[in-house]
Amino acid sequence: MLIHCIKTLMMGYVMGNNKGRKKFIGRHLMVKGEYVDLILKGIKKTTIRLGMVTPKYKEIIVHGGGRPVAVVKIVNIRHKRIRELTEEDAKKDGFPSVKILLKELRKSYGDIKPDDTVTIIEFNVIKKLTELDIEEPWLGLKPVEIARIALRYCKNIPENDREILEDLTRTESIRKTAVRLFGSINKRWKVRKTLRKYLDELIKKNIVKVRNNDT
């Protein structure tokens, strides 16, 4: 009986403190598909997450509606209590009022209390993955961005290709990956060939889109 009570208390402690646990955002940020257009139009400039959330990187890829939509740069991080959220916070997050913002937060997180902490992550869109420039090298993407997106969305990647893409996510450099995997900077063509292969696949599958320059 005593053991059962202790287990119940421990379970309640863990569940009750989920909102207070520190969480991290890596290279990828997921948003609801309904927010994608708001982000791309510059209306939604923040994402509000329940708890203490720490992004590990300044530049991250935002995904919504089953695809990557933008590369953004995090410009500010603030922590507030639910009760401290303002109309300005709501508008920056793409909502007309705090009332509607709180409604959406409840839809995402369930019960929220006035003293619960939220993290407000403010960002600027620096690259729209829905209108890439065909005139730019790699369509304006960094090789490491192509690698990260390909690893997330391309299926059945052969082991040798996967090795190249994964190494690029670590080195962030075609030259360094060529040296590390093939022993020579002169083997950069192998890395470039793999990148081109998966960039073409991402375009073919409509994962990323090229800007329509027709007038």
Image (tube, rainbow, N blue to C red):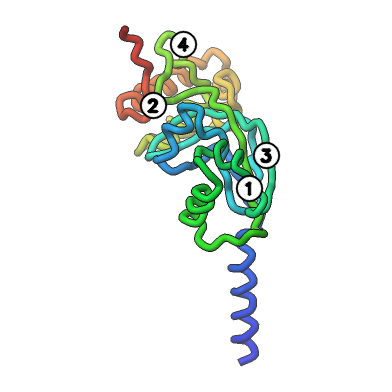
Give the answer, above or below, for where 86 lies relative to 7. above
Residue depth check, mark 4 versus mark 1: number of the one nearer the observer? 1
- The residue identified by callout 3 is 77
| Mark 1 closeness class: few <14, some 14–19, many ≥20 residues within 10 Å | some
Q: What mark, if any, has residue 48 been given in the picture?
A: none
Quick check: 207 left or right of 79? left
How far apart are the alpha carbons under marks 3 and 4? 32 Å
- Residue 181 in percent (x, y) is at 54, 27
Residue depth check, mark 2 versus mark 1: number of the one nearer the observer? 1
**Amino acid on which disc 4 is placed:** Glu
- The residue identified by callout 4 is 136
- The residue positioned 65% from the left and 83% from the top of the image is 6
- The residue positioned 67% from the left and 34% from the top of the image is 76
| Mark 4 closeness class: few <14, some 14–19, many ≥20 residues within 10 Å | few
How far apart are the alpha carbons under marks 2 and 1? 35 Å
- Residue 119 in percent (x, y) is at 64, 46
- Residue 108 in percent (x, y) is at 48, 54
Mark closer to the chain start, 2 or 1: 1
